[in-house]
């Protein structure tokens, strides 16, 4: 039995949820970090390597999310409402799914990931996932609710940035002389990138609901 398994064996069951949520939040930061590296990499081969790594993080996140649902089925005692645990796990998993969905579009459509719009979204992802991690980690003891609120407000602001960036991207696309097929590819990618910011906001909204109930 691994040390990690032994620790979990003696951990109060309701505390396991905090650990698993923190693992998910950490994975999201790693995904965003690799996405940033890919979009800032001028060597197409290296950028491709970074992009392919994101799938591994998405699988890792799926496994952790599955553990949350398993623990939810096993335990009668939970740190907050069962439906809130389910909602938060689902919302955070959606963030990972859409980051990977965006990545797949870059890979499948053979899009240059270093264009300015994609790079700008990558920076938003970094800030949003870091803020989500702060909020998630503060759920463990709920002693610094101001920090949670500030993180959620930042995520809401970043979602607005994502909306504005999509408007900017669409105006650039439809005022350019870009090939029609390339236009469709990039439009699909940019819309998917914007959804990532929506999903971050959804997760922040769930966290705000939790702290309102228990603060």
Image: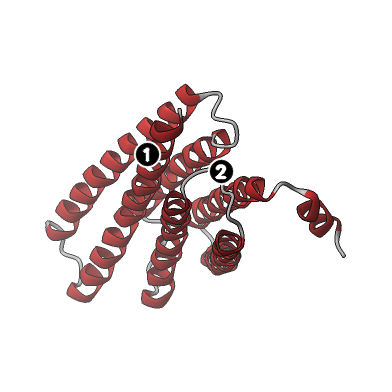
State the quadrant of the N terminus: bottom right
Point out residue 102 in the picture as x, y percentages from the top left corner.
39, 64
Query: Where does label 1 land, which residue?
Result: 209
Dot 1: element: helix
Query: Mark 1, residues whose alpha carbon is within 10 Å: few (<14), some, or many (≥20)?
Result: few
Cα distance, mark 1 to mark 2?
14 Å
Point out residue 150 in the picture as x, y percentages from the top left corner.
42, 27
Point out residue 15 in the picture as x, y percentages from the top left corner.
65, 45
Dot 2: element: loop
**Considering depth in this image, is 79 or 202 the residue closer to the camera?**
79
Residue at left offset 41%, top offset 28%: 149
Q: Is residue 16 left or right of residue 181?
A: right
Rendered position, 182 above or below 174: below
State the quadrant of the C terminus: top left
Name the mark on residue 85.
Answer: none
**Considering depth in this image, is 23 or 163 the residue closer to the camera?**
23
Quadrant housing residue 182: bottom left
- Earlier in the chain: of badge 1 and badge 2, it is 2
**Considering depth in this image, is 56 or 71 the residue closer to the camera?**
71
Name the mark on residue 79.
Answer: 2
Query: Foreground mark, 1 or 2?
Result: 2
Residue lying furthest front: 76
Query: Mark 2, residues whose alpha carbon is within 10 Å: few (<14), some, or many (≥20)?
Result: some
Q: Is residue 183 left or right of residue 154?
A: left
**Considering depth in this image, is 90 or 153 the residue closer to the camera?**
90
What color scheme is it?
A: secondary structure
């Amino acid at each position: 039995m691994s040390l990690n398994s032994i620790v979990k064996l003696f951990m109060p069951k309701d505390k396991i949820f905090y650990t698993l949520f923190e693992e998910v939040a950490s994975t999201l930061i790693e995904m965003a970090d690799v996405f940033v590296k890919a979009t800032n990499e001028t060597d197409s081969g290296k950028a491709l390597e970074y992009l392919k790594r994101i799938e591994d993080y998405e699988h890792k996140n799926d496994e952790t999310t599955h553990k949350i649902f398993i623990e939810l089925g096993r335990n009668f005692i939970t740190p907050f409402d069962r439906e809130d645990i389910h909602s938060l796990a689902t919302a955070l998993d959606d963030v990972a799914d859409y980051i990977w969905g965006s990545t797949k579009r870059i890979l499948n459509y053979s899009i240059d990931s270093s264009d300015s719009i994609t790079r700008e979204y990558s920076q938003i992802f970094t800030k949003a996932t870091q803020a989500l991690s702060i909020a998630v980690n503060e759920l463990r003891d709920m002693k610094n609710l101001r920090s949670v609120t500030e993180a959620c407000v930042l995520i809401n602001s970043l979602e607005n940035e994502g909306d504005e960036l999509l408007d900017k991207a669409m105006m650039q696309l439809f005022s350019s002389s870009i090939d029609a097929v390339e236009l469709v590819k990039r439009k699909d990618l940019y819309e998917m990138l914007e959804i990532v910011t929506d999903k971050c906001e959804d997760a922040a909204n769930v966290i705000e609901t939790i702290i309102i109930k228990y603060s």
